[in-house]
Amino acid sequence: MTMDRRTVLRGAGTAVALPFLEAMLPRRASAATKMKRPLRFIVFGEMNGHIRSTWVPTGTETAFQFSETLKPVEPFRDRLVIIDGLDKEASTKSEGPPHMKALGPMLTGSSLQKGNFTPGGVKASVGMGYPGNISVDQKIAQAVGDKTKFRSLELGVQVDAEGNPETRMCYRAINQPLPPENDPRAAYDRLFADLPPPGVAKKAWVAEHARRRRSVLDLVMDDYRRMLGTLGAEDKQRLESHLSSLREIEGRLEIGAGASCQRPRPVDVRGIACTEPDQAARRNDCTDDVFGAIGRAQMDVMTTALACDLTRVATLQWSNCGNRVVFSSLGHNKTHHDLEHQADAKILTQINVWYAQQFAYLMTKLASVKELDGSTLLDNCVVLWCYELSNGAKHGTTQMPYVLAGRAGGRLRSGRFLTFQGRAHNDLLISCMNLMGVEGETFGDAKYCKGPLPLA
Amino acid sequence: MTRAQGLVAAALLVAAVPARADAPPVCTEGIHQPGPTPPRRLTRLEYNNTIRDLLGDDSRPADIFAAEESALGFNNNATVMVVSPLLAEQLMRAAEAIAERATRDLKKLLPCPSVACGRTFVETLGQRAFRRPLEPEERQKLLRLFDQGRRTGLRAGLEAVIQAVLQAPPFLYRDAPASKNDAHVAKLDGWALAARLSYFLWATMPDERLFAAAAAGTLETPVQVQAEARRMLADPRARAMVTGFHRQWLTLDRIDRIDKSRNGETKDFNSALNGLFREEIETFLDWAVWDGGGDLPTMLTSSISFLNGPIATFYRMPGVEGREFQKVAFDPAQRSGFLTSAGMMSLLAKPNQTSPILRGKFVREKLLCELLPDPPANVEVNPPKLDPKLTTRERFAEHTNDVGCNKCHRLIDPVGFGFEAYDALGRYRATENGHALDVSGDVKGSDVAGAFEGAVELTNKLADSTQVRSCVVAQWFRFAYGRGETPDDRCTLAKLEREFAASGLKIQDLLVALTQTDAFLYREGAPR
C-alpha cells in the first residue's frame, strides 16, 4: 500500500445528505485497485415478504417497465438484474417454524438441521437447529477475504440480540452463526481501530502493536489447540470456532489499519435497539425514522469499508422477521410483522417501497465512489437484495423476488429482467459465487441445484 | 411420585433404550452417569461479575459483547454458544482495556514494584482466574510472557499477562476437561466443584472461602458441597440468580416490550407500567421463594403481591402510595400466583384483545414442558375479527369447529379460555362486552385433565400436577447445567424430582438438590 492517502481523501458529492462520512469517502479506492479492481460482494437482507402484483416488472428482458415497488431503484436500471420466479426449495421443504425455515436457508441454500432451538421440547433432538451449510457470503469471503483487514463485515439494523435460527442470516460454517453489529458507531470504531495517535509514525507503530498482540495471542491460541485434543466431536467444533476466530485476528495483525483512508469523523448515530430500556424513548425507537437512520449509517460504514478495501464482503440485515418496526411516517400504527399477516396489498407495498428507497440509497453511495480507471465501486460489486418471504401472510417461499445489482467488474450483464420457472434459489447463490470468481456447480442442498443461472 | 407420570421423564425413558445399548436399566448406587459435560463459556453476566471479583473492575465490559446464542429458553446453553470473529475481537479488546486499567496504578496492584512481586502477582492472578492451581506449563508460559513484556517495563509485562489470562480457555471456559484425565467418568475435585457452585448460585467466580475449602481438600464429599450450597443461598447474589432464572424461564424481559398503544384505553395504560409489571412479578417470585412459603404452590397460587403507587392505581387497589413496592393481598377469588398477574396476562394478549392461544401455549410450553407443533405454513394466523356481539370464546369457535385446527387447538384454547377474566391489559373483569363470561376449561392430555372453572382453579390444579413439577425440575436442570436433558440424565432427573417432592416442593431445596446429582458432582472424561 504505497499510495499517499491524502491524495485519495476527497469529498465525493452525492445527492443524498449524509450525516457524517461524506467528507472522507475516497474519490478513488485503494491502491490495490491500481493493479486490479477487486470485486466486492454485498447482501441487502429484507425481512418478511413482498406483494407480487406490485413487484414484478412488466415487459421483456431488456425492455421492461419498473413496478410500483421497484420504482425507487429505476435510476440504476442499467446496473440491475431483476429476477423473478425462483423457489426457495430448501425453505419450502424444511421442517420447522415458518420464519426459522425461511431465514435459515436464505443465504445457505440448506434446510434446517435438528437442534436445540425450539423451546419447550422434552429432549434435544426434537427441536430445530441451524441450516446445514455455510452462507454464500462466507463461502465467497473464504476465497476473496484474505487480503483485507476484515474477511467480512456483518452489519444489522435492530436485529434481535438473541442468537437463533430466526435471527441469524450469515454462517461462517455449519452451526457457526455470525451475529451482526447493530451499532454503527461500534462498527465504525472497529473499522478504524488500531491507528496510531496523531503525530506517531504509522508503520513502526503498527508493527509494534502487532508484535505485542501476537505474543499474547500465540500463548492463548496454543492453549486452545491443546484443549481441542481433550474434547469430543461436538465440543471440539465449538472450540474450533473460537480458535479459528483468533487465527483470523492473528493473521491480519499487520494488514492495513485503514490502509488508504484516514480516520474519518466519527459516526454520531447509535444503534438504538427497540428494547432500549429508556421508558420515554422506547416507542419512538421502533419507528421507521430511527430504523432508517441506523440503516443508512450502516450503509455509510459499509461503503467506507469497501471503498477503503478494509473488506470485500459485507452484509446488511434489516432487523428480523418478528420485528417491531412501525412505519409511522407512512401513517401505520401496527408493526410490520402484524401488518404482514393482515395482507393488505396497498399497505405492504408502501413498506416494500420504503425498503426500495433504502436500496437506492446504497446504490447511490456505491456509485459515488470512483475507482482509478473511472469505473465506480458499484460497477465492481455484486449486490444481492433478497427477501425473507414471497407472500408474507402465508409465509410463502416459492416465486421469490430477487435483485442483483452492480456489474461484477463487467462479468454480470445487467439492465435485465429475468423470469425463471422450476429453478431453486440455490442456483442464484451459485451464480453469486461464480460472479465473484468462486468455482462451483452446487451450493447448499445439492438436490435443488441445476447449476448457475445464465446471468453473464 | 412416579416418574412415568411426568411426560418429560417418560419421553426420556423411552428414548433411553435405543440411545445406549450399554446403559444400565436402573439407577444403582455406585454407577454414575453425569451426562455430557460441555465446556461452558462465561456469559456476559458472568464475565462482568468475574472481572469485578477478580480485579475490582466494575465497568461491565461485556455489555457490548455480541449476545449469547440461546436455546431452550436460556442464554447459557453451552451446546450452542460459539465464538465469531467479532466476539473474539471484542474479548481481545476488552482484555486489553481491562489490563490497561488494572496496571494504571502499579502501587495499588503490587505490594512492591519489584520483579519478584510481579512474578507472585502473575501466579496468584493465574490461579484465581483459572479457578485452580496452575499447571507447571501454564505457569512457565505466563512467566515467560511477563519476562518478555518486562523488557519494555514492568507495566507492559503485567499488561501482557492480564491480557493473556483473560483470553485463555481456563478463564473463559469452565468445566474444561483436565488434559490428563482419561477416565470415562470422573469425580470432580474441590476446585472444579467450587467453580460449579459459584457460577450456578452466584454467577461469578468462587469467593475466598470456596477457594480455601478447595485448597484444604474440604470440598470433596456431597455433604461438604451441600453445606457450601446452603451457605451461599443465604447471600443476596443467590436471590439475584433466581430472579435471573425466572426472567428467562418466564420470558419476563418481554414485558418490557409490551406495547398497548393501539388499545384505545390509554387512560389505564402507559409505557411506564411495563417496568412496574415486571418488577411486580419479580418481587413476588422473590418473596415466594425466599420469604413466603418457599415452594412451587406459593408461586402458582398465592394471592399476595407487591405493588407501588402507580401500579396500584392500575389495579384499583386502594391504600398504596409512593414508589416503594409494598406487600398487598388480592382477592383470592380474583388473582392466584404469577400467572394471573397483570404483567403476565398483558404480555399474553394482543393490544386490543385477549389471546387464549398465547395463554394456553404459555402454560403448555413453560409449565408443562410440552412441544406444540407450528401452525401449517399456509394458514393466515390473524385472530378472528372483533365483534361486540360475541365473547372472545365465541369468536374463536372456528378453531374448535374446524377439524384441522382442532387437532392442536383442542390442547391450547381450552387452557387459555380459563384466563378470560383478565382483559388485554390484565385487568380483572366479570363480563365481556356486557356478556357473561364462560371461564371453564380443560388441560386435555396432561395429568390435570378434567374440567376446571377459571384461572384460580387452574393454577391450583397446576400446583398439584406431577407434570408441572417435572417441568420445573427440567427448566432448572437446563439453566443450572447449561444444556438440555439427555437419556443419560434420567437418574439425575429422577433423583431431583424425588427430592423436590420430598421437600414439599421447596425451591431452595431444589437448588441444593441440583448440587447433589451425578450431573453436578461428576464429569464425563476425555474421549478415548
Image (cartoon, coloured by chain):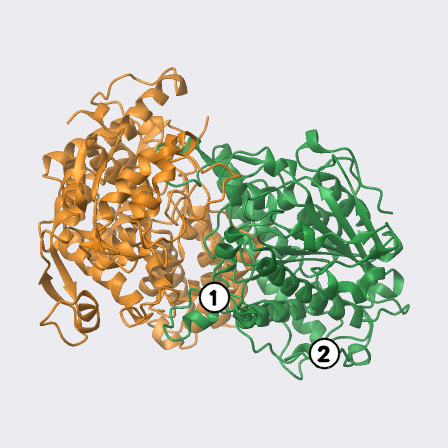
Q: Estimate the spatial distance between the alpha carbons at disc 1 and disc 2, rounded to whole Å.
A: 38 Å
Q: Residues within 10 Å of mark 2 (few under 14, many from 20)?
A: some
Is B429 displayed left or right of A71 in the figure?
left
Q: Please provide percent x and percent y for residue A175.
A: 54, 41
Which amino acid is tagged 2?
Met
Which amino acid is tagged 1?
Asn
Q: How many marks?
A: 2
Give the residue at mark 1.
A333
Asked where in the image residue B122 lies, by quadrant, the reply is bottom left
**Tint of chain A:** green
Q: Please provide percent x and percent y for residue B346.
A: 29, 57
Q: Please provide percent x and percent y for residue B180.
A: 42, 35
Give the residue at mark 2.
A24
**Tint of chain B:** orange
Please name whichever residue, A38 or A397, is drawn nearer the observer in this view of the structure.
Answer: A397
Asked where in the image residue B517 lies, by quadrant, the reply is top left
User: Which mark is in front, 1 or 2?
Assistant: 1
Farthest-out residue, bottom = A199
Is A291 displayed left or right of B213 in the figure?
right
Q: Secondary structure at mark 1?
A: loop
Q: Is residue A211 above or below residue A227?
A: below
Q: Residues within 10 Å of mark 1 (few under 14, many from 20)?
A: some
Location of the N terminus of chain A by quadrant is: bottom right
Please name whichever residue, B459 or A253, is drawn nearer the observer in this view of the structure.
Answer: B459
Is B36 displayed left or right of A370 in the figure?
left
* Chain of the residue that carries numbered disc 2 in the rendered image: A
Q: Is residue B268 above or below residue A117?
A: below
> Residue at position x 21%, y 30% from top?
B449
Please name whichever residue, B63 or B369, is drawn nearer the observer in this view of the structure.
Answer: B369
Is residue A321 among the parts visible in the rendering?
A: no
